Amino acid sequence: MHHTSLIATIVAGLGLAFVFGALANRLKLPVLVGYLLAGVIVGPFTPGYVADQELAPQLAEIGVILLMFGVGLHFSVKDLMAVRKIAIPGAVVQIAAATVMGVGLAVALGWGWGAGVVFGLALSVASTVVLLRALQERRLIETDRGRIAVGWLIVEDLAMVLALVLLPALSGLMGGTPPANASGGLLMTFAITIGKVVAFVAFMLIVGRRVIPWILHRIAHTGSRELFRLAVLAICLGVAFGSAALFGVSFALGAFFAGMIMAESELSHQAANETLPLRDAFAVLFFVSIGMLFDPMVLLREPLAVLATVLIIVVGKSLVAYALVLAFKRPQSVALTISASLAQIGEFSFILAGLGVSLKLLPADGRDLILAGAILSILINPLLFAWLDKAMVKVTAKEAVEPVAAAAQPHAVLVGYGRVGKAVAEGLKNRTPLVVIEDEGDRAIELREAGFEVVQGNAVRPEVLMQAGLDKATHVFVAVPSPFEAARIIEQARAANPDARIVARAYTDADVDLLTQMGATDALIGEQEIARGMLQRAPRRAPPPATAH
Ligand code: AMP
């Protein structure tokens, strides 16, 4: 027979995901629900067509690689270091707590403690795909909360990479099958694992950091968009695969590092956009492949155990995360976002479950429970976020907004860091303390990296303006393109500070009227300033009669 199973799997996966996704959308359910259902239908537990169970998870893995690559592209080493104080203890304590809860449930179900540890670890790690989709939909990735959530997840992923490598070695101790070639002690295995991860990171930081930007630059100069796209993909997939093959690091972690290194080059924006469509398509296949693993009968066979599993994931883990974030003195809005983001499980859990079963540590029932818990928690997650959106309005209204540090002294405020704002910021650099308000995440990051004090958010919102400390501002430069937004910003700025000099960007005489009426001291029209600039370059007075030098 002709070998078309790869084509059939992709066609069935994307086709059914589209049909059920559209249906879910029609019923006002998250489209994810449709993708999962499509998976259940092409899975082995329902009658009819069964997609290839070897190929589907591999296709899903490509989705995970592209997603983690995208995360890396938006995540600099600096960002990771900035959140380490909360992300590392947070992830570690949360993993420990979830593992304890898992052991508790396992013992109650009559499994051994070894099974409990695997079960608990699987419940402790959130899915990258689910978390990123939720954050992306709400444009939270570039925010403080988003960065903590992603950093937290990366620490969890790192811990799971360790767990995956150590489990086979520890299996004998934990009541499963001992490793076949048990050469060397436990300490040795541990040291080798850590050594490999360190070697990989060092390799990427020393070699990758030089080679990858160099390749991208060369290709960008050829002017071929197609080649550039191909270069980005080849580097992303190549590093992911190579890191797994050579260093035993997970695909996802390899891709993350490839992205993080590319993020340092100015071409990263373009690189991110080139991989978007492919990433979305493969993320869909990821959800379909999870659906395929699910045996719906487990819901009838063990309803109570399923319920307990879901409660650990959605309630237990959330409460721990919530308490931890508050213990780190972060505001409630941050605590709520982190809890909701991590209240689900996904790809790593399945890998762990699969390994546990093959080591005879985890009973097959355990894997079914993990799958049921994953699917149900992924289904519940969008609802949790919808609830969060509502709660957030109340919480942020109550939270006192603290002005940023530079706002304590007399300073200038610049709104908008685009073509106009950038030049203003550079010019003000050594003249006055400056706080910049910028709505767009990437630009805010760029600003921070350039050493400016930044408030990220739409300056029309009162709490954003408040953070910039308007009452102590001597100057406010409103460099946003929309005169209507500018008018609202100026109105609030003037109300907060009657004395500041407010300078605004305008296009027409009507804009100038509106903006000065709202309280602007000066409103400058672009064309007139260009004319002024041209005149500055004009001869000062009539040229003197030509004399030879
Ligand atoms: P440009 O038109 O190139 O000067 O860019 C304008 C910049 O202002 C962009 O970086 C926008 O993200 C930013 N911007 C536009 N509107 C707002 C707003 N309401 N609050 C904060 N930043 C804004």
Image (cartoon, rainbow, N blue to C red):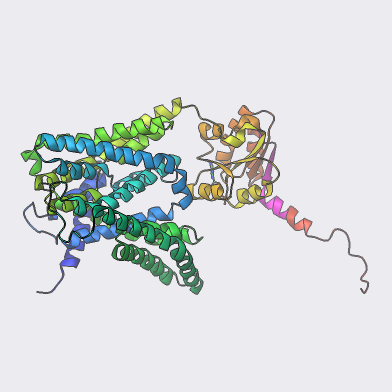
Q: Give the image location of residue 19, x and y in percent.
A: 20, 53
Q: Residue at x 50, y 61 (%)?
A: 265
Q: Quadrant of residue 62?
A: bottom left
Taking the image as shown, residue 370 lies to the left or right of residue 484, namely: left
Image spot of residue 92 (x, y percent): 33, 41
Chain part drawn in magenta: 519-531
Quarter occupied by residue 314 = top left
Q: Nearer the viewer, residue 200 or 180?
A: 180
| Location of residue 21 in the rendering, given as x and y in whole percent from the top left corner | 23, 49
In depth, the one of 280 and 323 nearer the eye is 323
Position of residue 237 in the picture relative to residue 516 (left or right): left
Instruction: Please name the residue shown 13% across and 36% down the image.
Output: 107
Answer with left or right where residue 374 lies relative to residue 145.
left
Residue 132 visible at all: yes
From the top left corner, tell me how far across and down residue 221 is, in percent. Answer: 51, 72
* Along the line of sight, the residue nearer the viewer: 189 or 430: 189
Residue drawn at (64%, 51%) of the image = 423
